[in-house]
Amino acid sequence: MNPFHKRALTHQEFEQDYYRDQRDFRRTRLIGVDLQGIELASLNLQGADLRLAINLHRAVWQGANLSQIDLRGVDLTELNLSQVVFWKAKLQATNLTHALLTGSNLTRANLNGANLSGALIDHANLAYVRFQGANLSKAVLIGSNLSFARMEQANCAQACFTDTNLEQTKLIGVNFSDALLDRSNLNRADLAWANLTRADLSGASLAQAKLWQNNLYDTDFQNANLSQADRHGASERGVSANLSLKEIFMGNYSSQNAQQQTQG
C-alpha cells in the first residue's frame, strides 16, 4: 500500500469503526462523516483530511492532536481550538475568524491566505508558521512564540502582539497600522516595507532588525532597543516632531529622553 495514499471513509464506515472502539483514523479522508458530538482528542487523526467532514462546528476540538491535518478552506469560525496540536497542519485559506486558539501548537503550520481576524491566539506556539497574505487584523497573540515565522504581506492592523516573540520573522510588507507590539522581541526581524503607522513598539527589542522604507507615522518607539537596526530609507517624518531617527537608532531611546526633547 502506498504510504502517502489516504484511505477514504464514508459516514457509515466511520460509524461502524467508531462503535467497534476503533480510534485510529490516521491519514484517512473523512467523506461526509458527521462529527457532531465527537471528541476529536479521543481519535488519532494525524494526517487526516477533514475537508469533506460535516458538523465540524459541533465537534469537540479542545486538546486534540491534529498534526498534519488537512483543513484547507474549511470554515472554523468562532470554534474553541484551545490546546489543539496543529503541527504542520494544512490550514491555507481556512476561516478562523474569532476562533479561540489559546495555548495551541501551530508549529510549522501553513496558514497562508487564512482569515484569523479577531482570533484569540495567546500563549500559542507558532514557530516557523506560514502566515503569508493572512488576515490577522484585530487578532490577539499576547505571549505567543512566532519566531522564524513567514508573514509577508499579512494584514495585522490593530492586532495585539504584546510580549510576543517575533525573533527572525519575515514581516516584509506587513500592515501593522495601529498594532500593539509593545515589549515584543523583534530582534533580527525583517520589517522591510512594513506599515508601522501608529504602531506601539514601546519597550520592544529590534536589535539588528531590518527597517527599510517603512511608514513610521506616529510610531511609538519609547524605551525600544534598536541597536544595530538597519534603517535604510525609513521615513523620519513619522516618529516624532521633536525627535530624529538618528537619535532613535543609536540604541535605546527612553521616555525620559522623549520628555527632555519635548521640554527643550
Image (tube, rainbow, N blue to C red):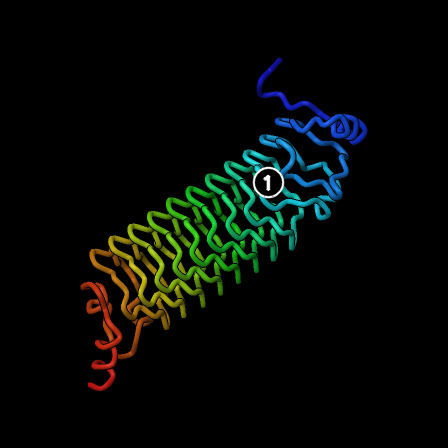
Above-or-below relation of 261 to 105 = below
**Residue placed at 31% from the left, 68% from the top?**
221
Judge whether 5 appears above or below 157 on screen: above
- Residue at the bottom extreme of this rendering: 263
Tell me which amino acid carries mark 1.
Ala
Secondary structure of residue under mark 1? loop
Kindly give the residue lying farthest to the front in the view shown.
Answer: 21
Q: Is residue 134 left or right of residue 32?
A: left
**Quadrant where the C terminus lies?**
bottom left
> Is residue 182 rendered to the left or right of residue 153?
left
User: Which of the 4 quarters of the picture holds residue 257?
Assistant: bottom left
Q: Which residue is mark 1?
A: 64
At horizontal 58% and vertical 21% (from top left) the residue drawn is: 4
Query: Whole-percent x and y of residue 180?
Result: 42, 65
Q: Tell me the residue at 62%/39% (across/down).
A: 41
Quadrant the N terminus occupies:
top right
Of the pair 165 and 64, the residue shown nearer to us: 64
- Residue furthest to the top: 1
Q: Position of residue 218 (x, y in %)?
A: 37, 73
- Graded by Cα atoms within 10 Å as few (under 14), some (14 to 19) or many (20 or more), the crowding at tag 1 reads many
Q: How many marks?
A: 1
**Residue 263 in the figure: left or right of residue 163:** left
Residue 239 x/y as whole percent: 31, 71
Query: Which residue sits at x=25%, y=83%?
Result: 262
Q: Nearer the viewer, residue 55 or 64?
A: 64
